[in-house]
Amino acid sequence: MPELHSLWSGLGWPLLRLCFFISLGVFIGNFIESLNWTRFIAKLAYPLVKLGHLQDISGASFSLAFFSGVTANTMLAEAYDQGRLSKKELILSNLFNSLPTYFLHLPTTFFIIAPLIKKAAIPYFMLTISSAFLRTFFIVLLARFILPAPKESGQSYRLPNEASFDLKEIAIKTWKRFGKRMRKILSYTVPIYVLVFFLHRFGVFQNLENIMAKYIDVLSWLPPQALSIVALQLAAEFTAGLAAAGALLDSGSLMIKEVVLALIVGNILSSPMRAIRHQLPYYAGIYKPALAVRLIIFNQSFRIGSLMLVALVYYYFC
């Protein structure tokens, strides 16, 4: 009986509570996304476009990227094929779209992450948001220095037509997305949370710490428990690393700062594989293969660089 009580208090109840809050959060996040919450942010594009000497088509693509990355990239590809954008302008415009791409699914992402890593979610999001803004402002300044000021065309770009507020339609759309995402999230979260609980209980992480002290130098600044978060992000999905992070936080094995840094490191190291799996298929369908690869390399390089910069600041000054 004491053993069963220990399992329930240490594993059963925390996992049940976690799944409830994840489900609630994912539903709320999907509902917010269905309301096209990014519409008002897209209106901020014009001052940045003007500052960066970008063309109207770049501003239109930036605005559309808050709604659909595929549509935004298709617009740039067509303008490039028609000769309205040079290759240099195309690359800069594509990089410029990293901010709306980040914000597109932010509500759902937040409500998935927050229940899993709790207080660590705030510094993690502050770092990733800072890196997204950092990339955008750097691209705008870079574009201003290397692109000539465009001639005033007198034309403006428009946001997609605002759909009528149909609560029933929004609810159906939200429920469909909710079911699809929850199946995937729980398929990772539950087994990994249980696995990490038992690994910690049987002293596996203590043994890893002893091994790491002897043989591993590259990431020696991270605790061995944190390395499991990085490994799961590399081997599976981001959700898998989050599940491990949540379990290690709940058990007191890792501090908030260690979890945040482990997630950032895993995010950086898994970027190339994630780009191949998620970006390359649809980029190659929009751009010519060589150009698609080039755009992905630039995107991932800027993303990794900005994440490394904010992570270093967090590591040394927070």
Image (cartoon, rainbow, N blue to C red):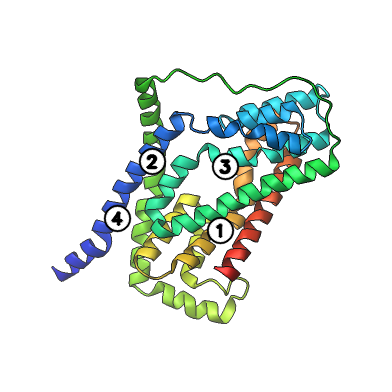
Residue picked out by circle 4: 15
Residues at marks 1 and 3, CA–CA distance in whole angstroms: 15 Å
Q: Which mark is residue 26?
A: 2
Q: Earlier in the sequence, mark 2 or mark 3?
A: 2
Q: Amino acid at mark 4?
A: Leu
Q: Quick one: SS at disc 4? A: helix
Q: Amino acid at mark 1?
A: Ile
Let me know if residue 287 appears in the view: yes
Q: Quick one: SS at disc 2? A: helix
Residue picked out by circle 3: 102
Q: Viewer-proximal residue, 299 or 61?
A: 61
Q: Quick one: SS at disc 3? A: helix
Q: Earlier in the sequence, mark 4 or mark 3?
A: 4
Q: Viewer-proximal residue, 53 or 223?
A: 53
**Residue at point 60% right, 62% down?**
311
Q: Earlier in the sequence, mark 2 or mark 1?
A: 2
Q: Amino acid at mark 3?
A: Tyr
Q: Earlier in the sequence, mark 1 or mark 4?
A: 4
Q: Earlier in the sequence, mark 2 or mark 4?
A: 4
- Residue 57 pos. (x, y %): 73, 26
Q: Quick one: SS at disc 1? A: helix
Residue 5's place in the image compared with 147, above or below, is: below
Residues at marks 2 and 1, CA–CA distance in whole angstroms: 22 Å
Residue 225's place in the image compared with 75, above or below, is: below
Closer to viewer: mark 1 or mark 4: 1
**Residue at point 34% right, 73% down?**
202
How many labels sit on residues? 4
Q: Which mark is residue 264?
A: 1
**Residue at point 65% right, 60% down?**
309
Residues at marks 2 and 3, CA–CA distance in whole angstroms: 17 Å
Mark 2: give few (<14), some (14-19) or many (20+) Cα within 10 Å. many
Q: For the N terminus, give its image quadrant.
A: bottom left
